[in-house]
Amino acid sequence: MKLKCFLASPLPWMLATVILFICLISMTSWQTSLGLIAIIWLLLWGYQAKNKQAPSKKLSARRYDFYRSQGLTNRDIHVYRQQMQVSLDKINQVLNFQSSDPRVKAVFNHWQIKKLLKQYFKAINRAPKRLDQASRFIFKDLDQLVHLIDNYQQVDSDILKRTNYQKQQSLIAGIDEIASHIHQDYQDFINLDKEIHYDQIRK
């Protein structure tokens, strides 16, 4: 860890560059030396930039064992966790959405959209091998819901709101329709989960 921190600082690379420059200039022309040093610096910059990327959440041994018990390979686990993180980011966008529009509130309250998204996400987390059965939610409906909300916010922020009433109404109707799809998919997902659990008990 100390070595990584040392290498992450600019001082060792500056010292290495000076030493390398002295060595190269004694063997080649100064133009060639500068060119080689520039290439080395680009490689080092790319290495440091790569290592500065935010690391993914560490997978605990317990969670790893759970994934393996569900029949997931290491590759499956990697893909699953990546996709679920993307979905979680989108869900958080919806959870952070606030509106004073009574029409929007009515739709959100009717379908309990925020609660619904959290419950569906947790249900998928409990059965990772069934991710494909939630594909419409993960890969289509969630994207569309975020897109509709983003568009509504843009229209709602327009100064000329009165001229955008029909656009707002259309977007709210779209949110209502997508919410109904997600609600139905969630019910199908948990009902199938109950059937699977019942079959396992019978065995």
Image (cartoon, rainbow, N blue to C red):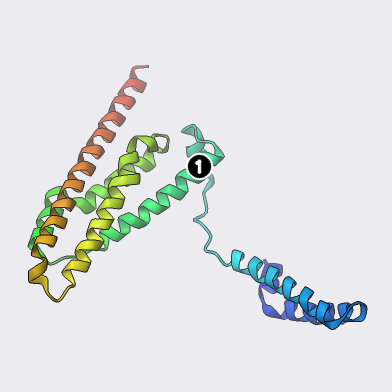
**Left or right of 122: which side holds 108?**
left
Q: Image quadrant for the C terminus?
A: top left
Q: Residue furthest top?
A: 203
For the residue pair 44 and 95, the one nearer the viewer reads as 44
Q: At 21% across and 47% down in the image, what residue appears?
A: 178
Q: Position of residue 136 (x, y in %)?
A: 31, 41
Q: In this figure, which residue is indicated by the disc labeled 1?
A: 77
Q: Position of residue 13 (x, y in %)?
A: 73, 77
**Left or right of 83: which side holds 103?**
left
Note whether 155 is above or below 107 in the view shown: below
Q: At 27% across and 49% down in the image, what residue appears?
A: 117
Q: Image quadrant for the N terminus?
A: bottom right
- Indicate the quadrant where residue 165 lies: bottom left
Mark 1 is surrounded, within 10 Å at the Cα level, by few (under 14), some (14 to 19) or many (20 or more) other residues, namely: some
Q: Position of residue 37 (x, y in %)?
A: 77, 76
Three-letter code, disc 1? Ile
Note whether 62 is above or below 3 in the view shown: above
Q: Residue furthest right?
A: 27
**Left or right of 64: which side holds 176?**
left
